[in-house]
Amino acid sequence: MAKPQPKGESSPGDVGREATLLNRILYFTGAALGVLLLIGFASLERADYQAFGRASWLFTGAFFLYAAAAVLSVVNSFFVKSTFAFRLTTGLLFGGLALSVTSMIHRWTIAGRPPFKTYYESLILLAACTAATYLVLELATRVRIVGPFATAMCAGTYLLALSKMDEEILDLPAALQSFWFIPHVLLYFVAYAALGVAFCAGVVYLITPGVKVLGEKNARLFGRREMDFYQYTYRIIVFGFLFLSLGLVTGGVWAKSAWGDYWVWDPKENWSLITWLIYLTYLHLKSVRGWKGRKAVVFSIIGFAAVIFCYLMMHLLPTAVQSDHVYSG
Amino acid sequence: MDTSESRQVRLLTSFVIFIVLALIFNIADTATQRLNGGARWIPIGVLVTAVALFSIFFHTVVRRYLLTVRFASALILFLCCATMLGTFVLQRVSREEFVASYSEYFGEHRSALGVMKTFGLMVDQRAPEGMPGDHAVQVIPPENRRFLEGAHVFLSSIGFIDVFHSYWFIGLTFVLAASLLLCVLLRRPWRRAQIGFVATHVSLLVLFLGAFIGTLFGVKGFMWLGVGETSAVYRAHPNQILDRGGKDREVTLPFEVACDDFILEKYEDRYKLYVYTVDPHGKMRKPYPLEFGSRLGAAIPVKGSPYTVTVEKQFKNYEETRAYAAADKNGVPAVQFTLFPDAAGAGHGSQTWLAQGEAATIGGRKILFTWELPPEMAAEVAASAPSKPAEGAGASKDAPADATRAAFSKSAAPPQFAQGIITVRRAGAEIRLRAETGQSATIGTPPVRVEVTGVFPDYVRLPEGKNGSRSDQPNNPAAELKLSGPGAEEIVVAFSKPEFKEFTKPRHFQGMTFDFEFGTAPAARTDLTLVGSTTTLVARREGRLVVYPLTVNGAPVPVEPGGPAVRLDAVLPKATPETQVRDSMDPGHNPAIELTVSGAAGASNRRVLVGDLEQHIALGDDQLFLLYRKQFKEPKDYKSVLRIIDHGRVVRTKTIEVNDPLTYKGYHFYQSSYDSNTLARTGLQIVRDPGLPLVYIGFFLMLAGMIFTFYLKSRVSGSGGQGNGKTPTEG
């Protein structure tokens, strides 16, 4: 305790003293832009907003909680500095997560199968996983600066889900009735969620490079008293990568039991391999001189772009017709 | 600092040399029309030897440059790019498939819709059953064809058509394996803190080895096995590396497989009331089932529209009979008639009542009843009454009169059945075509020729971009039409189902619409008008009106060769209707619901929707469509009861199903498909993969190593974290 400690742990203002006014402005505009972009993207997807009228209150409620959390956390980070406001944001996010999980359980009971089959169902799962991952991270590290991005991501995912809504619940085809169905999907979505949060942290690092993760608690957690967001992002990616690998391996084992082959060079398989390889390279680059900090974070963002492509855009590939598991619906 | 520069240059050079070498092998291989069997080892061997020799002779280079993480990262990224390539270029396709797929792909992605799709801006409109997708098939211009064919030749010569089995890709994995091996052996000292590092890297080596063994020595094949049959012979697929482009061959297993039973499990049939609403852009939204459960009589609001639907009654098997009874006054004219499908009036006809002005569609033919012939039709009859011998022998057949009956029955040729009528409209003009391959007509100015090039009762889009029929059942009838006009030619598919109508959108000939009324109607569709006052039947045949006199309860009068024939059963100048609806409670035949639809203005509309007829209600303003139909179900599961007989002894029995294979002596039997027509044949995939245990060990080792490296290492090696040689805290 020789050095003066920054307030750290319970201080909500992780943007902190190090951040200059310019950084704050960058951060604020970046966050606001992120939210706007996500909403814009979802509306370009022709999310038919009247669809809210057809959505259940669980869906609508979760969306508005996520959206409120996103707006509030942006406002908090810049204008309001009260602990209460931050707790409120966390509470809203918790509420959204609770509604997401409830809606999934509800659908599970109606469908009599896990609600992971269609695009729509998987997007709800992704939003819930993202919210959960971010919340765990926030509670563990007290780092709230990633909040606006992560919450906006949840809300954006919901908007996307709105445009893909399928009220008709279909039964599982034979190939999906497997022990591996639930673990495979869950592992992958936890991985995607973690990589999504890491992407948000990376964006924060890029627009406010001086920001650091501080505090006693984190000293215990990460073995160091202070680390910058590049290292923080790295930790999250390591977690995501582990789950990505678990997903890949369970996928292989499942494919073996269903199709007789653990790997068939199917486009979806290939792209999940590509994302895995990109993050693998990212992990290796840590020990390459000149590939730390900004460059590495940019690289991880490319990795996340590959995740998005693998998850949402498989139908654009000319080889998609050859695939056995491009999402339906 | 300049060494770093030159190091990169040298690395790049060796990479380029390697790739060029591999490409040369590939091109040579393609040019000499495939090496076979053992000969394939030569290029692989050369590549491996090259890598090994390079490593040995230039071990200082290897140590200083190739062993760097930088090199490993570059290698991984290189593999990454190769994998991407394998998803952008269609893999293992013939030249024809290549040309067809890409011209369609680019065609689709060039249009405005395509651009939107490319950027992921389109919401897929999912149609209920067997979603037909985008159906306009691009006619390939010759220059595109030439380009694509050339591209195929070039790409296959450098191995891009089969990236994952090309020499350069295999060589790349060898280099990666060599790099991994050297990395484990040379790079770091063996210490406890390195367990994770060693495990992850060795795991990949083990995985590669397993995959390599599996690819070279594994066997894959397929077997059709009838229920009650025993066989040891299956069709083995050619090895993807050693026998590229080879053919399936028959191989005998060292034991026999018997199939004792095949079980197809289905989900319970459920009929649902589907709601189609329209979004503000006028596009139909995805349909969804309106759940009414047991809430009969309760108004259910339709989300996203101003309507409410009240389900009044559910029928397990809806039967409707309508009769008219003679009335003294306040009645309407009514007629009862029977339509026989064949000209002789034999067989089972359908008896129908019609009231004044009503029309029925039976067997794809519209029959209208009117008491008096409308004046314009009467005028037309008068005009065409005298027969016109000038039109030739063919026309004289059409002349009305009893005499023609003899001519009809003489025509011994089997009646030609078309599968319905296609109505084409363009700028006010209208033509009708029989849904029969080869039928054609021209429409409008400048003239566009419409030709029927195919009729599919159960439409399916075949993988190679062609249209086909899944079965003979009229599940999703469609007709393929070729449109040719000045400067353009294209193919469209016209659907019979109303909900698929929007998929028929010609690219060049915009504004043309197609109505395909499917039905097993006789060759020429005839519109019939029953006239009550004169007890005659007026038929429109090929543009002319023909009058047939009828008598009540007389002999059936054929309307044309091959039928149908019409018998008049009753004519009532004044009658009142009595409709009897009953539910025979015989489940599954004709389920229906009776419902009331109330609009924004409160107006209600009482209707009956019958499940099997695929009828839909369109509300007046086309904002709401309702359809009562079976929920689409894939089979729940399919299983085969298999028995393995080795040397005359039954050694194993198992009921295999999807996701649960049988394994014996290293052979795995997977439930892969079944004969959907007879349900008496099961399709088994047969796989033998000697490398599999290694692959699984690799999987396990990799995950364990990762968990150790990421989360346990710091505990084992103390709080130092980065493994800087501290003694472990625990033993």
Image (spheres, coloured by chain):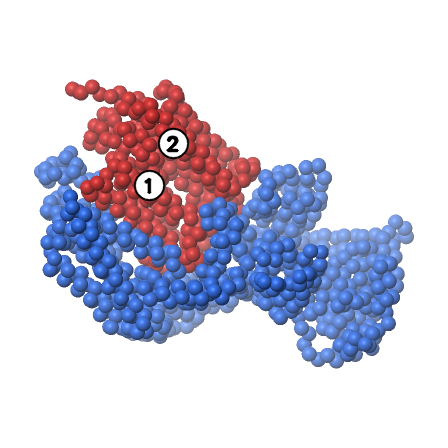
Chain colours: A red, B blue
Q: Which residue lies at the image location 49% right of the left edge and 57% below the top edge?
A: B107
Q: Is residue B141 left or right of residue B578?
A: left
Judging from the image, mark 1 belongs to the subunit labelled A
B548 horizontally vs A214: left or right? right
Q: Position of residue B177 (x, y in %)?
A: 20, 56
Residue B656 seen anywhere in this rendered image of the structure: no
Going by the numbered disc 1, the residue's amino acid type is Ile
Q: Which residue is mark 2?
A: A30
Q: Position of residue A153 (x, y in %)?
A: 41, 36
Badge 1 marks a residue whose secondary structure is: helix
The residue that appears at 64% across and 45% down in the rendered structure is B624
Counting from the top left corner in percent of width and height, residue B336 is at: 80, 61
Q: In front here: A129 or A313?
A: A313
Question: Where is the C terminus of chain B found, in terms of image quarters?
Answer: top left
| Disc 1 with disc 2 on a shared chain | yes
Near mark 2 (Cα within 10 A), the count class, few <14, some 14-19 or many ≥20, is: some
Q: Amino acid at mark 2?
A: Gly
N-term mark: 1 or 2: 2
Q: Which mark is residue A301?
A: 1
The crowding category of the residue bearing disc 1, from other C-alpha atoms within 10 Å (few below 14, some 14 to 19, many at least 20), is many
Nearer the observer, A176 or B709: B709
Query: Tag on residue B375?
Result: none
Which residue shows up at 70% across the image and 60% down it? B430
- Specify the quadrant of the image occupied by residue B710: top left
Give residue B57's quadrant in the image.
bottom left
Residue B298 as seen in the image, left or right of residue B227: right
Q: Position of residue A288 (x, y in %)?
A: 20, 43
Element assignment for label 2 = helix
Q: Residue at x 20, y 67 (%)?
A: B45
Q: Is residue A291 visible?
A: yes
Depth check: give the residue in front, A50 or B488.
Answer: B488
